[in-house]
Amino acid sequence: MNTHFLLIQTSVKNKKYNKATETNPKKLSQSDKDMILKLGKLAFQQLQKGNLIFYEGDLTECGIDVTEASEYSALCTEMFKEESGLYQDKVFSFVHLSIQEFLAAVYALESWLGKSENVFDESFKCDKLSHLHMSAVDKALQSKNGYLDLFLRFLLGLSLESNQNLLKGLLTKRGGQTQSIEETLKYLSDKIKMESSPERIINLFHCLNELGDNSVVEEIQTSLRSGTLSETKLQPLQCSALAFVLLMSEEVLEEFDLKTYNTSEEGRLRLLPVVKTCKRASLAGCDLTYTSCWTLASALQTPNSPLTELDLGCNDLGDRGVKLLCAGLISSLYNIQILILGQCGLTEGCCSYLASVLKAPNSQLKQLELRDNNLQDSGVTLLCAGLKDPNCKLQELGLSRCGMTEGCCSDLASVLCSTKSQLKQLELRDNDLQDSGVTLLCDGLADPNCKLQKLG
């Protein structure tokens, strides 16, 4: 798609500025090639720096005449644009990051095809295409926010000779790449086995797919169709392949139950990104820790995720883990309505973060289960501040065996009296509330504003 877009817009530019009559967009003049590669160099340099906008000096450094900026804009029409920034300085950008990543990949590949250069290390001659690939893989894995992930996939996809046909007017023809592709495939497979980040592993599977290697994925797909997947112990590599298959599927899972799969702790971690593709995620009793919450928080911020119910009960998440989760839950993208955190090793230290979730303008949370956590009176008091917030939509709250005494009952009573509270069910069993605490609660229950229907 990007290749066709590039060629068509080059043709449009030539007709507009050069009065060209050539109707075949695949035929590029030398000036077209030079212009595209200069843009590619600019795209690559700025991508490495993490820049989405750049200035006249950046263009000049890549051999682009700033006075002809309008022609460059016309070259790609909606690909490259010029804007007025602060203080009337001219700033430039590609209109979409994927266009920048694609042109950067074209430049990186042609640098090797035409001059045996590794754009990541120009001090040494790069004899093999696999050396360029390995450098790109390493750089992508080192990036903190994955800003080179799509560039890497473009580079690998373009490296197949079958995918170079449309760009044969731009890319230098060079044979003998089959062995390099095999070496790259092995390198990617080794990286998948060693990598710990589920998101990066998924991108590496995308890379294998770009090079046409789907062997592990096909094995998993066969097992899924036959229903035998739960009968064998899955290795971490197989779990990564399973996650890739489920994430690539257009079907929304009704429920993803992590306990269904017999695998190791590492394998379970590699499966966590799947939660973003299901309606209900059951992760209870799966030996997860606070480190798992990095992946879960990222999943909660996925646009258009169907996830509405998340069960994390009986995992040692601790306050640190819940803090990470709450960062995802406060995101404007999340749609969680049921959150289960029973027996997760929590204390009052996480309650301020949970209260922030309840107060969030976008909060959809209707049911929160916190049983068997040592929240104590101080933690419940913090939660009550969130329950009284006008943005709070919580209707069910579970606080059984949470180390509570009569000390928090006045705060709970004030929630019951609040006109803002939506609370309909409250579970308080096995706490040391005593008669004095229950008396306070009864005052709240008797208030005409109280909406509570069930108290346990």
Image (spheres, rainbow, N blue to C red):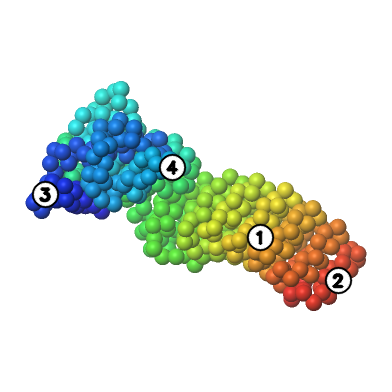
Judge whether 177 appears above or below 249 on screen: above
Disc 3 from disc 1: Cα separation: 62 Å
> Which image quarter is the C terminus in?
bottom right
Q: Position of residue 4 (x, y in %)?
A: 21, 52
Q: Give the residue pinned by disc 2.
A: 443
Tell whether 232 sits left or right of 151.
right
Residues at discs 2 and 4 in contact (Cβ within 8 Å):
no
Q: Nearer the viewer, mark 4 or mark 1?
A: 4
Tell whether 99 sits left or right of 270.
left
Residues at discs 3 and 1 in contact (Cβ within 8 Å):
no
Which three-letter amino acid code belongs to the residue tagged 2? Asp
Residues at discs 4 and 1 in contact (Cβ within 8 Å):
no
Disc 2 from disc 1: Cα separation: 24 Å
Which of the labelled discs sits on residue 6, or is there none? none
Which three-letter amino acid code belongs to the residue tagged 4? Leu
Q: Give the residue pinned by disc 4.
A: 86
Residues at discs 3 and 2 in contact (Cβ within 8 Å):
no
Near mark 3 (Cα within 10 A), the count class, few <14, some 14-19 or many ≥20, is few
